Amino acid sequence: MESKPTNRNLVAAKAAKKDEFYTQYVDIQKEVEAYLEFAPDTFRGKVVYCNCDDPFESNFFKYFAANFNKLGLKKLITTSYDGSPIAGAQLTFGEYDEGNGKRQRPKAIAVEIKEVKDFNGDGATGIEDVEFFLKQNPHTRTPLAGGGDFRSAECIKLLKQADIVVTNPPFSLFREYVAQLVEHRKKFLIIGNVQALTYKEIFPLIKADKLWMGVTIHSGDREFRVPDHYPLNAAGWRVDENGVKYIRVKGVRWYTNLDHGRRHQELPLMTMEDNLRFSKHKEINGEGGL
Ligand SMILES: C[S@@+](CC[C@H](N)C(=O)[O-])C[C@H]1O[C@@H](n2cnc3c(N)ncnc32)[C@H](O)[C@@H]1O
């Protein structure tokens, strides 16, 4: 089942404070890898913090955990949010069994990973090792009394440890979210709506060269997973064979203050002569004017 995309989805989501849009792994992978192409050590020796991310549903956690050694991370910190309606309800990161065959709906937790080794002894290191490690080491999960709100004292304490914050924050709190990152002088790579460019809190940061667009999303739409209970009354949705719901959203952009190659590419400027030649060419070929 499918229908056409629109960015009304995001606008409506923001208005309704429907913040549960889960980023696809491939979108995170493409963006992060674009920074590595420009500067392979972008994440080396760094503490990465995903502060709006249930480790059991977030592809941000999965991506950084699976690529911990390749990126050369020093530490990966993830905090989940109590208010997330799908926390503990929908698993994509293996089945985390609390003993009764089902994962208990968790309170907000912080998970800190300091190394990824071949914990399960299968001769390779990867996401399975992280999963194995988390199961074997329940102490790596710390309950968060403040509910995992990115503004809570506990999360700010973790933020202070972080070098780079990477996530898709709640659309309804985007301004506050960015303000906090700037206040704490953090490097970041986050997803937002293209309309954020015009916010009075965001535009000055762009002007001051303290924030810019990321590398990989400039147009078109992207697909996000949404919770089962989200109504699919907007355009651009799909339900997969397992009944998992996705919506396609236009106007999504990466925002960052990490340097990347695209920032250094010269824009091909057209001279007046080029312009005239181009118009003439179009006229002759019946393609209409500029
Ligand atoms: C747009 S979703 C993205 C989730 C995840 N980062 C991803 O990309 O798959 C934003 C997440 O932030 C959570 N959230 C909402 N308000 C929050 C807050 N005040 N502090 C921390 N997380 C919050 C929501 O529950 C939701 O899971």
Image (cartoon, rainbow, N blue to C red):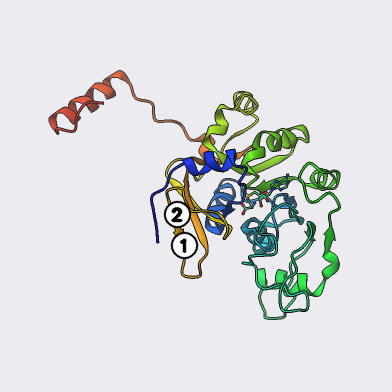
Asked which secondary structure carries label 1, the reply is: strand
Relative to 7, residue 111 above or below: below
| Amino acid found under the numbered disc labelled 2 | Trp
Q: Residues within 10 Å of mark 1 (few under 14, many from 20)?
A: some
Query: Image check: 83 left or right of 268?
Result: right
Q: Residues within 10 Å of mark 2 (few under 14, many from 20)?
A: many
Q: Are marks 2 and 1 in contact (CB under 8 Å)?
A: yes
Query: Image check: 244 left or right of 220?
Result: right
Q: Quick one: 284 or 289, which is closer to the camera? A: 289
Residue holding disc 2? 237
Residue 227 in the image, given as x and y percentages of width and height: 58, 58
Q: Can residue 258 be seen in this snapshot?
A: no
User: Which image quarter is the C terminus in?
Assistant: top left
Relative to 74, residue 264 above or below: above
Residue 211 in the image, given as x and y percentages of width and height: 62, 33
Residue holding disc 1? 239
Q: Residue at x 45, y 46 (%)?
A: 221
Q: Quick one: 53 or 105, which is closer to the camera? A: 105
| Amino acid found under the numbered disc labelled 1 | Val
